[in-house]
Amino acid sequence: MNTLPPSFSRRALLRSTAAVALAVPAAGLLAACAGSSGDSGTAAEGKVTAANPFGVAEDAALDVVVFKGGYSDDYAKFDEKLYAKKFPKAKVSHSGITEIGTELQPRFVAGDPPDVVDNSGAKKMVLGTLVADGQLANLSDLLKAPSADDPDTTVEDTLLSGALDPATFDGKVMGLPYVFTVSGFWYSKTLFDKHGWTWPTTWDGLTALAAKIKKAGIAPFAYGGTTAPDYFFSPLMALAAKQGGVDVIKAIDNLEAKAWQAEPVKAAAEAIASLASSGYFLKGSEGLDHTQAQTAWVQGKAALYHSGSFIENEMKAITPDGFDMVFGTVPPLSKTGSLPQTALHAVAGEIYVVPAKAKNVRGGKEYLRTMLSKEAAVNFTKTTHALTVVKGATGEEDFGSTALGSVTKAIDAAGDDLFSYLFPSWYADLATTLKTEIANLLAGRTDAAVFLSKMQAKADAVAADSSITKFKR
């Protein structure tokens, strides 16, 4: 059983974006999207055409704010140039920032949000909260609009199946996840080849490898304890899912009683805690931010770092030549679990939103449509070595990247066995508690039992709070 639809797999990633014959002609698509949403902003309305399905006024300014993190923001500047070609009279403003929530919360409160926001990063706004507060525009008309590359194919039909799940609330798509991200352990192939190490297929094999790495005078693992300790929650959930199946994760997302006390979750938490008790983390990791931890890793002070597939681009400026970064799937606790060793934590992320109170909602949606063009998607993968949610945009091209090549191989091996968890983007209080408690677990300040008890207590409190909007998988 999968948390993502079966077609959200390597096969779908490589599928061609050839035109699909639709029963509805281009004019029908325009009628379906133009004026179908009540979110239009205050900008003047332009003429609706095949090239301008939302009726963006040709001189309406566009305010774009992008998270300048693992993927930088150069790709967004490229997309803005594509937008400017369509609307040369429009002023396009660009801001690349690192603390999305901190900097944009005041603008949302004041009713003056940007037109497009890449709501990503360690300090992103909680998507569920924005949805519950009515702060985001519904993107249903974007999905029904003709795609940028083929007027007879809707935007929705150019996307990987399941790509919209992380931004879908009660059947309404309230954001656009743009990047197909997989999470796992990262290491230098050069370092592994030098020592004769190979990637293990079981958790026992990983801990045995960690012992060898430590004996070689290198810290097995590093993590950013001050900003991103929850990066290391992903392997915990991977272990739980591979042992007990994806229903274990769904129970946690759905705030079910005793979900955090399920045996596969206990076993997973104990496995992660054992890394701390065995002294396998880089000394001082609890005091490092994620950039410092990642820097220590590429400098060879630690052999393994758990992260999403944005890591290569995030560290490209300081990664030594010949490092040959590659991806390792989280190995299972046993070979008799519910999911195979090759199963992956994969999710469409880097969620873009169009604020409901933006001045130019039409332009915001048109910008997202531009991002989903093949030209924009190819540029993104070429410059960031990460995949987008646009089907078959780059085929099997790895652009000379060992990291991208290893990710595509891992996705191919996983097939349909992909899973994800959503509660951190649904419930702000639970996400905050997770960061605190996983940091305590990794630092050895608490054990697995205390970690799980505190997470269950917070989950129960959220479930019992009638003022919090609930979501269900």
Image: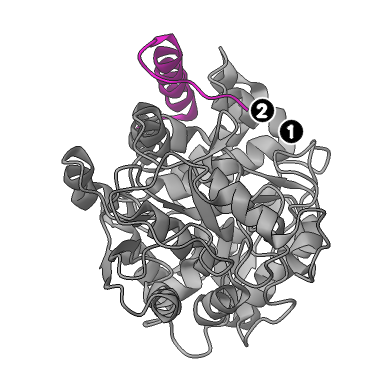
Observer-nearest of 59 and 141: 59
Give amino acid for label 2.
Answer: Val
Q: Are marks 1 and 2 in contact (CB under 8 Å)?
A: yes
State whether residue 368 is above or below residue 93. above
Q: Decide if residue 243 is in sight here.
A: yes
Q: Quadrant of the N terminus?
A: top right
State whether residue 273 is above or below residue 391. above
Label 2 Cα crowd, 10 Å radius (few <14 / some 14-19 / many 20+): many
Say which element carries label 1: loop
Q: Which numbered marker is on residue 410?
A: none
Q: Residue at x 58, y 73 (%)?
A: 377
The picture places residue 141, in percent across and down from the top left corner, at: 55, 48
How far apart are the alpha carbons under marks 1 and 2?
A: 6 Å
Q: Quadrant of the C terminus?
A: top right
The picture places residue 77, in percent across and down from the top left corner, at: 37, 77
The picture places residue 460, in percent across and down from the top left corner, at: 45, 13
Give amino acid for label 1.
Answer: Gly
Query: Which residue is labeled 1 in the image?
Result: 245
Image side of residue 188 versus residue 26, left or right? left
Q: Which residues are magenta?
A: 445-473
Query: Which residue is labeled 2 in the image?
Result: 248
Count of labels shown?
2
Q: Residue at x 68, y 77 (%)?
A: 394
Q: Decide if residue 347 is in sight here.
A: no
State whether residue 93 is above or below residue 124. below
Q: Residue at x 34, y 59 (%)?
A: 290
Colour mode of the rendering: one colour
Image side of residue 90 versus residue 239, left or right? left
Say which element carries label 2: helix
